[in-house]
Image (cartoon, grey):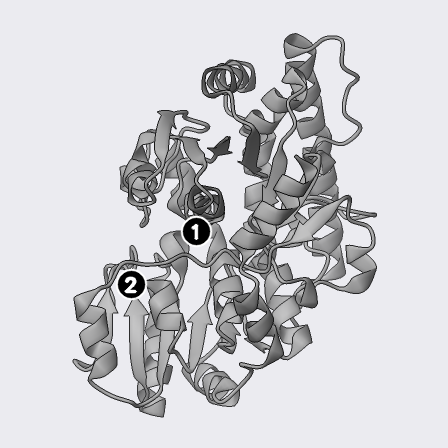
Amino acid sequence: MTLLIISPDYASHLLPLATLGTAWRDAGERVVVATGPATAAIVESFGFERVNLQLGKGSNPGVIRAEDQPKGEDDALRGFFDATRQGMIATLAFQAEARLSDLMWEPVRVAREVLAVVAAVRPDSIIVDHLAFSARLALVAGGVAYADVVLGHPTALPVGDEVYGYPPEWPRAFTPGDDELEALRELCVRVSESFTAEWNAALAELAPHLPPSRSAFEEHGELLLLNYPAELSPPERTALLPTHEFLGSAVRDEPADPEVEAWLAASDEPFVYVSFGSFLSVRSDVLTRVARALEQLGLRVALATGSADDLPELPPHWLVRGFLPQVTLLKRAAAAVTHGGNNSVTEAATFGVPLVVLPFSTDQFAGAAAIERSGWGVALAPNTATVDELAAAIAAVLGGPRGPLAASLQNTPGRDRAYRAATVRD
């Protein structure tokens, strides 16, 4: 039996997908990953086979810098970072405008490459990143069944009257005006229409016998796998989802890191884990305020600096590195400060770690709102939160959650839920 995993060339996407694949690997099945060269080392670390498949122009092996991206992608990334400094509406509008011209990269050519990979590998099961639109288009055109993995917040697949790119909810710290919201929604509707037209044009070339899509952002696989805890999804929204399985989280096993293990063993004092992920760590101005708040509280800290390169001098007893083993540290952390990426949120939930969330973009706003609504943490606006406000929020969540959600996620890991859901259908 063979599982094919199709992933963009981004570590933040491949790591959870590969973690799901370990259930097939441990059952003695062959696992093949179709992705680009930047994440080849990650594929190798899981013991999987790799076939080359480039789904987009950009890549991210773990920490992303604009200067490392291809020409054009570098300026787009800088534009995105600049938009985050202006706030929620500006960022979401920038991302929507970018989708108008770059929704799918060479979809017909890429789709044909995907179908060639499928023909060569001859998988019994396929799991695909939901955001790998060209790959999913290929499978639709080829009549190939697949499991669709939503790695972000569930709102990445719009339901009901939701519009892709327009958050259905956001934290109380964000107060956009009605005019701004109306303009953003109208833009997102235009983008959705443009994307659907692009999808249908490619589909007509690949499979002219198939009917066009009514709304391409609402397309999904036969089985929908949501890398998110069901307990954090509003029941009224869950009821609108197609056939699905909430995975809870995709927590990976990490190799031992002697430096980290020594730091953990050096003190029993509680510590706070801080990471803004591979992209948004570039916002060193916000990281600096977070660091000052933690210094003010006198707390022990493990801080992943990512692509930030102008942070102030930090206390010598802190654990500070460009990249840190997040799962290892969240198992022991008393709290975490995060941008609200779905990996960070779901991994923290697995270990019952309360959060201070500073969302910058995309589905991070909806995710932060869910954390706030559920009492799992506090959400603040990253551009305006002061050192004192950050310190108060961190102090407020200390000693927080743990509890039944963490127990549920640990007792039935996401990889096992995915394997059960996919193999039952097979």
| Vertical order, 334 against 72 (above or below) | below
Residue occupying image coordinates x 77% and y 19%: 212
Relative to 312, 172 lies left or right: right
Q: Which of the two labelled residues, at mark 2 and mark 1, occupies the earlier sequence position?
A: 1
| Vertical order, 315 against 303 (above or below) | below
Residue occupying image coordinates x 37% and y 53%: 278
Numbered mark located on residue 82 in the image: 1
Mark 1 residue type:
Asp
Label 1: few (<14), some (14–19) or many (≥20) C-alpha neighbours in 10 Å: some
Residue occupying image coordinates x 36% and y 91%: 297
Figure quadrant of residue 197: top right
Say what secondary structure mark 1 lies in. Answer: helix
User: Quadrant where the C terminus lies?
Assistant: top right
Which percent across, then down, holds residue 137? 62, 24
Relative to 335, 363 lies left or right: right
Numbered mark located on residue 147 in the image: none
Say what secondary structure mark 2 lies in. Answer: loop
Which percent across, then down, holds residue 341? 50, 58
User: For this rendering, which residue is in front, 165 or 226?
Assistant: 226
Relative to 21, 271 lies left or right: left
- Measured Cα–Cα span from mark 2 to mark 1: 26 Å
Label 2: few (<14), some (14–19) or many (≥20) C-alpha neighbours in 10 Å: many
Residue occupying image coordinates x 59% and y 43%: 149
Which percent across, then down, holds residue 425? 69, 38
Figure quadrant of residue 207: top right
Mark 2 residue type:
Leu
**Residue 384 visible in rendering:** no
Which percent across, then down, holds residue 93? 60, 46
Name the residue that disc number 2 marks. Answer: 324
CB of mark 2 within 8 Å of CB of mark 1?
A: no
User: For this rendering, which residue is in front, 342 or 222?
Assistant: 222
